[in-house]
Image (cartoon, rainbow, N blue to C red):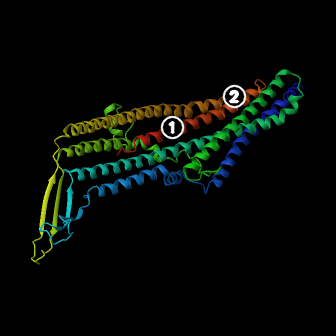
Amino acid sequence: MNIQFSFAKNKHKIIVFCLFLLVSHRGYTNDNVKTKADEQRWTPALTLQQVMTMAVDNDYLLKQHQYHQQAELHLAKAALSYDNPKVSLSILNLPTDSWSLNQEAMTQLKVGVSQSIPRGDSLELKEVVHGLNAQQHEMLEFNQVALLNLRVLNLWFDYHLVVKKIAVVNTNKTTLDQLLNTITSRYQTTVKGSRQQDYLAMKLKRLALIDQNLKLNADLSSLTSQLNGLIGRSGESTIKLSPFRAQGYPELESLVEEHGLYKLVWNEQILSKKVDRHPLVLNQEFQVQRAASNVELAKQQYKPQWNVNASYAFRDSNESHLTRSDFFSVGLTFDVPLFSTNKQDRMVHAEKSVVEANRTKYLLSIQNLTNELTVQWQKLQRLNERHTLYQQSLMLVSSQQHEALMLDYSNDTGELLSVLDARIAENNIKLSAFEVEIERLKTLAKIQYLLAGEKS
């Protein structure tokens, strides 16, 4: 009779415990089923590489740099051209009493041509300046492509993180819903305050999950809009992306080993060599070269500008029909920079100052990229440690805690709310581990951008 009485007394505990096991199992099963269904639904979806390609194809800033580069290349070719020759046609010494062409010996019809010669090597230097401008825009193109890839990666990872969070929230909510449906009738009619408090606590957790789900869906809509905007589908509210795969990013995973970062002694000199071929650094380097060319161009003003001219003057026969000789003239003119020396000196000094300013910007860009690479590398090390902690300890302990509380509850020594909290905590720890993995991949993506010009 004692055995029967004990069984009858704890019968509701056993039923709820079995139900909780069933709900937990169904939660995982449903999650797996949804994942397979999602994979089928995402089969024709966009891959990461496709999104990157579409983002590059639809970026207006990239096209702007391309057009600027083409313009500078055309200007470089045009810079070597001389000014057009000047042709003059004039009548000289025409008598005003008769307006006759043959009355006076000095009356002549003159055709002349003149051509100016550029100062020194000014044309060649202008070609160099425009060529450097074109190279600057080319570097800005490379940087823009790297930035687009980084932005797509960040949005891609954030999107899948939010999807994972929504799945976890839905799993927790499903667990709560099914347990609430089972114990609602019993807890609502229970007089004891502890039972009523448990019921209200579970209901409050459910409402909090609903609020969290709404917020996550808003975040998902925002990420969807950003991705659609990048690939030229602005205005669309949905997007289909291929599923996240933890081992699906070999380029990022091999990045650290490929560049020898684990073996790298982190000092400023070595780090500077890692980033000195970055497109932004090369852009600043070309600015320094362009400024140096402008110094040489300013120095050309010290040299004279030559002008060659030639003319042919036709004279009519005189009134006695005697033929007069025509005139041919050739001349050379040049200016002498005697009174503009101070102006030219100031122009040269100004261009030299621009060179130093650009050289400072060049060094500053290396310093900024070096500092950022150091920060990201240190961040990656901490994330690797956290990743190991989650994989080897936290997830295992949380699972053991959940199992222990389930056992306590089945033995009538624990509370259902504690079991539920442990179940939700276990799911949240798994989600946190996924967040660490996502943050780690995003950090690798940033390091990949910082090493965009590094040649292994």
Q: Nearer the viewer, mark 1 or mark 2?
A: 1
The quarter holding residue 317 reads: bottom left
| Residue found at x 12% / y 63% | 329
Left or right of 418? Residue 393 is left
Q: Residue furthest bottom?
A: 321
Residue of label 2: 404
Q: Residue furthest top?
A: 193
Secondary structure of the residue carrying tag 1 is helix
Q: Quadrant of the N terminus?
A: top right
Is residue 144 shown to the viewer in this render? yes
Residue toward you, 19 or 246: 246
> In the image, residue 104 lies at what x, y percent?
13, 68
Is residue 456 shown to the viewer in this render? no
26 is higher (above) or lower (below) than 85: above
Amino acid carrying label 1: it is Arg
Q: Residues within 10 Å of mark 1 (few under 14, many from 20)?
A: many
> In the image, residue 174 lies at what x, y percent?
75, 39
